[in-house]
Amino acid sequence: MGKDQTYKHISYSETTITELMIPSYSNFGGKIHGGILLSLMDKVAYVCAAKHAGNYCVTASIDTVNFLEPIEVGELVSVMASVNYVGNTSIVVGIRIISQNVKTNTLKHTNTSYFTMVAKDESNKPVQVPGLILETPQQIRRFAEAIKRKELRQNYREEVEHMKTSVDYEQYLELLKSERCLVTLRN
Ligand SMILES: CC(C)(COP(=O)(O)OP(=O)(O)OC[C@H]1O[C@@H](n2cnc3c(N)ncnc32)[C@H](O)[C@@H]1OP(=O)(O)O)[C@@H](O)C(=O)NCCC(=O)NCCS
């Protein structure tokens, strides 16, 4: 893998996609379908990551997407992305969605999420990405939070692996006792 010794400013790759929410984007309840927003988020994450990397990027994982408020048909949605963290070949893109009611000119923050993108070279192998220049306390905080989330994900993976391999069946039943499920074992 080639070593990339360059550093880029966050502003270099900051990207916003703005789109009007039309009736065909709505779900059965008349609100904008979550999948429409996820698709916009994936697009903006790609552009932001590819700009920073100077290479093609793929989505490796998506950290919790919180839907804070519903979006109505007729609102103007802005999906804003900036690089929060870079690893060796990976880039964490922080995404924030703001929805505007164009009639009243009011804004609401509806979604936040973090996409981990991996840069690939022509032979489809992960390739090193430029480092990141941090210029504000907010940028430092976001970088540090991404490190923390990475550690928490690692702990989570180890915990799940431990459950699969070490926790016995009786312990699972114990865990289920206070839950709203009926265990009716079939022979
Ligand atoms: C994501 C992918 C590139 C990882 O490949 P891999 O062979 O496991 O690569 P590596 O183990 O060398 O990891 C490469 C980087 O990805 C990161 N990574 C891998 N899987 C990850 C995951 N699930 N979540 C977050 N980061 C991940 C690693 O931490 C590493 O980061 P670093 O270089 O900054 O330390 C590969 O699994 C892939 O191509 N998946 C399909 C992606 C795709 O099709 N996306 C949807 C359409 S774009």
Image (spheres, helix red, strand yellow):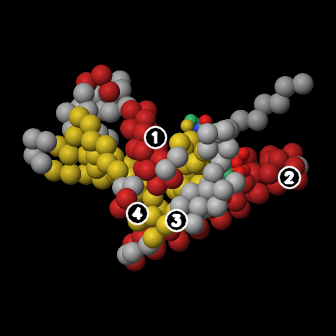
Seen as rendered, the residue at the extreme left is 103
Circles 3, 2 touching at the beta carbon (< 8 Å): no
Residue 63: percent from the left, percent from the top?
A: 54, 51
Kindly tell me whether mark 3's CB lies below 8 Å from ligand 1.
no
Q: Nearer the viewer, mark 2 or mark 4?
A: 4
Earlier in the chain: of badge 1 and badge 4, it is 4
* Amino acid tagged 4: Ile
Residue 187: percent from the left, percent from the top?
A: 90, 24
Q: Which residue is mark 4?
A: 10
Q: Which residue is mark 1?
A: 42
Earlier in the chain: of badge 2 and badge 1, it is 1
Tell me which residue sits at (46%, 40%) in the image: 42
Kindly tell me whether mark 4's CB lies below 8 Å from ligand 1.
no
Q: CA distance from mark 4 to mark 3?
A: 13 Å
Seen from the viewer's position, the closer of residues 68 and 12 is: 12
Q: CA distance from mark 2 to mark 4?
A: 44 Å
Q: Quadrant of the N terminus?
A: bottom right
Q: Which residue is mark 3?
A: 6
Q: CA distance from mark 1 to mark 4?
A: 18 Å
The 10 Å Cα crowd at callout 1, few under 14, some 14 to 19, many 20 or more, is some
In the image, 153: left or right of 158?
A: left
Q: Which residue is mark 2?
A: 167
Residue 15: percent from the left, percent from the top?
A: 35, 50
Earlier in the chain: of badge 1 and badge 3, it is 3
